[in-house]
Amino acid sequence: MTKSEKLFERAVKVLPGGVNSPVRAFRAVGGNPRFVSRGMGSHIWDEDGTEYIDFVGSWGPMVLGHSHPDILKAVQTRMMDGLSFGAPTALEVEMAEKMIEMVPHIEMVRMVNSGTEAVMSALRLARGVTGRDKLIKFEGCYHGHSDAMLVGAGSGALTQGEPDSKGVTKGAAQDTLMAQYNDLASVDHLLNANLGQVAAVIVEPVAANMGVVPPQAGFLQGLRSLCDKHGALLIFDEVITGFRLAPGGAQQYFGVRADLVTFGKIIGGGMPVGAYAGPRALMEQVAPCGPVYQAGTLSGNPVAMAAGLAQLAILAAQPEIYQKMERAARFVADHLRASARRYGIRLQVNQVGSLLCPYFTQTPVNCFAAARTSDTNLYAKYFNQMLFRKVYLAPSQFEAMFVSSAHTQDDLEATVRAAEESLAALV
Ligand SMILES: *Cc1c(COP(=O)(O)O)cnc(C)c1O
């Protein structure tokens, strides 16, 4: 029995499913999760000492790779002066200033502790300022686990939300309307059917929680126009895309302005951090300035701010990182396509910036329904073949492959070799 197996045996007795977040479980791919003992650059090691090339990167935060010396140093230095005060610290001001400097169209920031919290708070703000109750989200987009956002698929869901999880009340779900990604007509229809009632349209500017689905030309611009026409706020959930697609996130990358933006993952540098941001007039509606209440004991925690700020400072100072990551992701995507062609495997590889996803389907993937055509059993086999060859991928078809700036040409070549062999093993 490996150490990971022994740990998992203990874990399932004391943690539901043996994990603290369901995406870490290996249920979709079979086998036991690897317990990670350490990470350095683009590599992680499990408790048994096996070294992997890591393409999960903590689901996005580790955009500079693991254990970046500047980030570790910032944390070490800061922690010597105390871990939390519940009173303002200089680092919170610096963090907000840095974010505002890097991201277009935001003038004020509120720090929170997770992406879930950021989205939940931004939605409350949108409802508070518009005086409207309803929200539009897209099928297959993930916005954290707050009640209003745990509404997903179902034929009735296009007009009326159905909860995705037990414990979410109909009341909480009924104000969430479901549109189809890359389908402006579905949004137009909902806005017209609920005239003057929609507070906000929330979207992942690149959908990265159903694999990776890029917005088609005109989709985000179209959302901007529809929101303007109907007086609804456009919220970009940039918990993944923020500081990843570009220093200024999706607003910069696609040239489309959002009214509110949510962040998480990268801005914590590996620590638990989230934030929501927008123009002054909107953000000043948040307590203690305005009537929309939102608070947090550990929000803006100095050690977390030190880690996040150190990471953002590097991204701001070295914008060439973005071209490097994009080239790396394109290299992997191109090789995956070529290998799949060689073995006659139906594979669609979507790639935007440093995000990519191979889908085992012949259908081009531009929405949730298309993503669902993927053969998830084949993905599970591919995942295990890759793991055997020491490449650590997300244990689910419907997640992105995250490239970091720490991935070297050697890593990439080892990865595409492993993929070539893994795909060959599937036929
Ligand atoms: C991960 C994620 C969230 C939730 O963030 P947590 O920190 O896990 O709560 C929200 N939105 C998007 C787009 C995400 O990818």
Image (cartoon, helix red, strand yellow):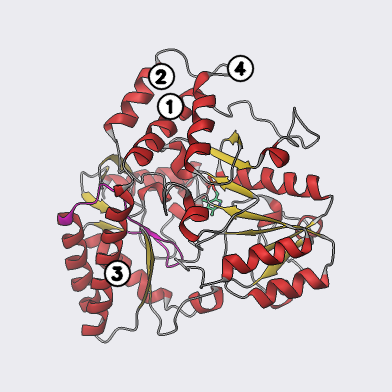
Span colored in magenta: 393-409
Front one among 356 and 392: 356
Label 1 C-beta lies within 8 Å of the nearest ligand 1 atom: no
Instruction: Say which residue label 3 marks.
Output: 333
Instruction: Say which residue label 2 marks.
Output: 78
Residue 275 vs 331, above or below: the answer is above
Quick one: label 1 or label 3, which is nearer the N terminus? 1
Residue found 69% across the figure and 71% down from its top: 187
- The residues tagged by marks 2 and 4 sit, at their Cα atoms, a distance apart of 15 Å
- The residues tagged by marks 3 and 2 sit, at their Cα atoms, a distance apart of 40 Å
Residue found 48% across the figure and 19% down from its top: 83
Is residue 403 rendered magenta in the image? yes
Label 4 C-beta lies within 8 Å of the nearest ligand 1 atom: no
Q: Callout 3 environment at 10 Å: few (<14), some (14 to 19), or many (20+)?
A: many
Instruction: Say which residue label 4 marks.
Output: 87
**Amino acid of disc 1:** Ala
Q: Secondary structure at mark 1?
A: helix
Q: Position of residue 302 (x, y in %)?
A: 49, 23
**Amino acid of disc 4:** Ala
Q: Which mark is residue 306?
A: 1
The C terminus, quarter of image: bottom left
